[in-house]
Amino acid sequence: MKYIFLIGLSLFLVSFTFQFNLNSDPTEGVKVGEKAPEFNLKNIDGKTYSFENIKDANGKAPKGYIVVFTCNTCPYAQANEQRIIALHEEYAPKGYPVVAIQPNDPAQKPGDSFEAMQKNAKEKGFPYLYLIDEKQEVYPKYGATKTPEVFLVDKDLTVRYHGAIDDSARDESGVEEKYVENAIAALESGDEVSPITTKAIGCGIKGSKAN
């Protein structure tokens, strides 16, 4: 009887492990030091952008890219909108434009539809590209799971920092360490970026139920 029980338990565990592996996403995404995945996504102006045709505020090839996965509807993303605007206004003229990507499935979050993105950008005066990951193929390649979540990419398209904008996800007045700004300063001075990763705090990205 004990032998039969052990066999049954073993079969159950094998089945459970197999099912878990089927349902798990094996993609871990890009790591710091690796090449940033390419993308070719539609902006709110209807044009399509990639690393190849994005320019800085001076119309030149950027020194780097502040890639931010963000959206309209997440309270954390909303709390960071002005900070993202400020990053672009400060660093796009210095060669580091913000490239915002909206990864959520509009069927799950209608407030993140392309039309809603256009409306929000117009009302808030977004000065940066606001792209839609319509097929939801880009954010898994990066390994993004939250909005907002930042990947600082250098001119060689290497990821140099990944994580939060700063150390105060909701309250800007509580910011003590500006991770993205410090990382850019390190790149500019030729120093090592530190920290290279932080925990992105925000809302989970809403994937399509069809996937």
Image (cartoon, grey):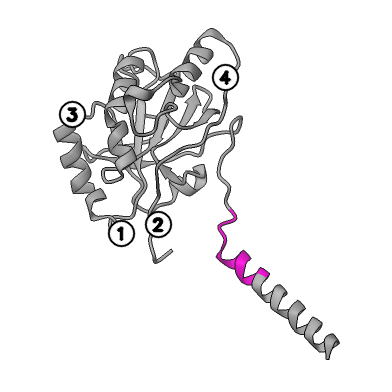
Bounds of the magenta segment:
17-26
Number of the label disc, if any, that sits on residue 125: 3
Q: Position of residue 155 (x, y in %)?
A: 49, 22
Q: Which residue is mark 1?
A: 108
The kind of residue tagged 2 is Gly
Number of the label disc, if any, that sits on residue 193: 4
Is residue 170 something that shows in the picture? yes
Are discs 3 and 2 less than 8 Å apart at CB?
no
Is residue 54 something that shows in the picture? no
Q: Secondary structure under badge 1?
A: loop
Q: Position of residue 115 (x, y in %)?
A: 18, 47
Q: Position of residue 135 (x, y in %)?
A: 37, 54
Looking at marks 3 and 1 on the same chain, the residue that comes earlier in the sequence is marked by 1
Marks 2 and 4, how far apart at CA: 31 Å
Residue at the image point whose x is 39% and y is 66% from the top: 210
Q: Secondary structure under badge 2?
A: loop
